[in-house]
Amino acid sequence: MHKRLTAVSLALILLLCACKRQVQEKEPENIPGQGTAVTEQQGWEMKEVLLPDADAALADLLAGSDGGQTELLYDMAGDAIYRVVWAYGEGLETGGICIQKLESPYLAWENTLIPAESWMEGVYCYVKSAALRQDGSICLLLQGIHADGTQSYYKALWSEQDGCSAEKLPDDCPGEELLAGGVFYADMQDAVYFATDRKLYYFEGGDAGKKELDTAGYIWQVTAAPDLEEQVYVCVNVDGGGFCIQTVSGKVVFKTEEAAGAAIGKVAFSEEGKGFLCTTEGIWQFQMTDGQMEKIISLTEEGYVLSKVRAAGIGRDGALLVAAVSGGEPLLLRYGSRQETGNQETEASDIIELELAAMYPSAFLKQAIIAFNRQSNEYHIVLREPADGESRSDFQTRLQAEINSGGGPALFSDDVMDLENAVEKEALRDLTEDFAGLEEKISANARLLGQVDGRRYAVPYSFSVSTFVTSMNVVGERESWTPEEMMQCVRESGAKAAVSNLDGPKLFDILVSRGNLIDWENNRCELDGEKAVFLLEFANEYGDDGQGEEMGIRIAKGEVLSLYMSLPGFMFVQGMEALFEGQEAYIGLPAENGGNGNIMVGDTLSVNRACEHPEGAVEFIGYLLGEEMQEKLAMDACGHGVSGFPVTSSSLESMFRNVEELAESEDVLESPANFMGYDYMERPLSMESIQKIRKLLQSAEPQTHRTDEISDIILEETPAYFSGGKPAEEVCGILQSRIQLYLDEMD
């Protein structure tokens, strides 16, 4: 049953998120000690390589200096990364620049130190700006101080083959207005470009003088397309949203609103007018000839949390390379075809790859995989998701075939594995001894997650709670309700629908599976009597066929009695507090005999019994339960995270401390917000609402009955009644026959 609830709740979460947003030349190798995360999309994959610390490499070179350094350039040409730093201090006889280069396999930076007096005889030259050209040479803007105190500006060029050279610029170049900073570039024809805010200045040499270009918005990159006659392009954030690409003559060659609102990143041109826009949020591919653009990968959805994109380029094998920063760590992302990345060096690596099969991996799980791979020198987790268009059942069938033949992934997420069935078939490793101390670490009600007959075969790392939420004005002080009590409340309230997002078949499924028409202990059912017909008729009358986008308004008007929610964090709690005016009641799903109706849905991992390296799988699960990852879940749950609550008691308590501190703060301003169509002023939660959530999380219990198969039967047979094709008595008779047959087979 909990899988069915989770699927329905997942759709609701996506809907709620939408409502909430209305107002708010060599392959990078897999080097031992460096992380590699793999994701798949359209036959391509993303690989990650951690880069060595450039500052540390420079510190070794400048050991003994008491000065400092200023980074002037970080860019890519081909597969190589270049960095230019101005260094100064008492430990240096003179200041100077250091040109750093990092090539595949990205193990160590090469450093070239150029003293400030070596450019022009008798002139002390500061470096003001630097630009990388596509051939790997670096053009620099120098400010020269002469012995008599006068100054002039020089355009300098450095390359590994020819060393250093410099020539004086005209007196009006660059001009005082350009010395405050901005974007600097130099092309292969020796023209230089300066950009400040939305204006581009450029000097083509000779008697051409200075030229100016007013652009359509803020300039954030000037670059060249190597295969388009070295044409120089200006990348601009357009006023009002989106971005465009202009030539230096002012012609707009590409414009789109597709990436409107995306963080400023980097553009890399590939071929034939094609290019990539790379931001911290994702990667878009565009075609200048036809103005088309599409998002090819969402980095955030794949688990990458990038604070900055520093450079982008096309490698010699045609793959897109993106230099970025994540969690303070410099890294290189490589996006290319899987065939191109499968080299012998990677396969010969000491790193052991362990597959993790998951149908719907959360953002947290993806981020955890990336973080684990970065710090592990021995094991790397490779996420395996369904192929494009592959259904859950087909994916599970394929996995089961691999398991039956003695193979399969090392780890399974709960959304691809029926735990009890897998244990019965002896497909899973018994993890009881591996996690002997787990019971003392996690919250009391989460301890049953992943257990079968008192043995642990899966380990929870996060959880959500499926519940019904209504008003205390309807249910009073009661903390649970039976199906009969819920139906009575619906009728007395005058509501037109019982539960949001539950149409007739789904509402009937809930009433049957949570009521006493099925005797789970003795595997018997009574679905062919008057009570079953009564429930079916009630579901027909009070099933919800309304529009989800206006659900908040319908709840506020009393048209719908209760919300069906899956709570994976605090994201929607403020909305419910506002919607029910502080009278929200987490009463839960109906439960026979007044039992607990709040269902704990755990995100768990199990280990394939055939796994050749179970110690690596266990290590990864332990990493998820470590303080760093559990605290991350706690912080995400306090904000807009929807990956679930932490399972460890200490992190749960930390989460509540953070929420309570915010509730007691006097410095938080109110802001307009929208919850499922209902407008309200967002403010910190009240202490009363926080205590309700605390009680909810502490009291929720895992689902004890396996009802997915029964739900399938109900959802298959009952539409014939709701469409008017069959009478209720006939449908209930069919249900009795089919469900009893299933229960008999379970004996």
Image (spheres, rainbow, N blue to C red):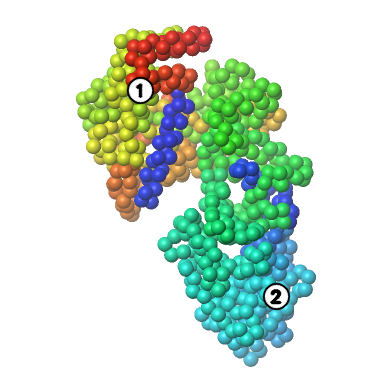
Where in the figure is residue 410, as x and y percent of width and height? Answer: 65, 31
Q: Is residue 472 left or right of residue 294?
A: left
Q: Quadrant of residue 111?
A: bottom right
Label 1 element class: loop
**C-alpha span from label 1 to label 2:** 78 Å
| Res 438 visible | no
Which quarter of the rendering shows the N terminus? top left
> Which residue position holds label 1?
723
Q: Is residue 50 left or right of residue 595?
A: right
Residue furthest out toward the bottom: 148
The amino acid pointed to by label 2 is Leu
The amino acid pointed to by label 1 is Ser
Q: Residue at x 68, y 75 (%)?
A: 189
In the rendered view, tell whether residue 571 sits above or below residue 590: below
The disc at residue 157 is: 2
In the rendered view, tell whether residue 61 sits above or below residue 564: below
Where in the figure is residue 347, as x and y percent of width and height? Answer: 75, 41
Label 2 element class: strand
Q: Residue at x 71, y 46 (%)?
A: 341
In the rendered view, tell whether residue 60 sits above or below residue 463: below
Q: Is residue 698 left or right of residue 584?
A: right
Q: Residue at x 23, y 37 (%)?
A: 557
**Mark 1 or mark 2: whose residue is earlier in sequence:** 2
Viewer-nearest of discs 1 and 2:
1
Where in the figure is residue 579, as x and y percent of width and height? Answer: 28, 40
Q: Quadrant of residue 65?
A: bottom right
Where in the figure is residue 702, as x and y percent of width and height? Answer: 45, 24
Residue neighbourhood size for the residue with mark 1, other residues' Cα within 10 Å, grouped as few (<14), some (14–19), many (≥20): few
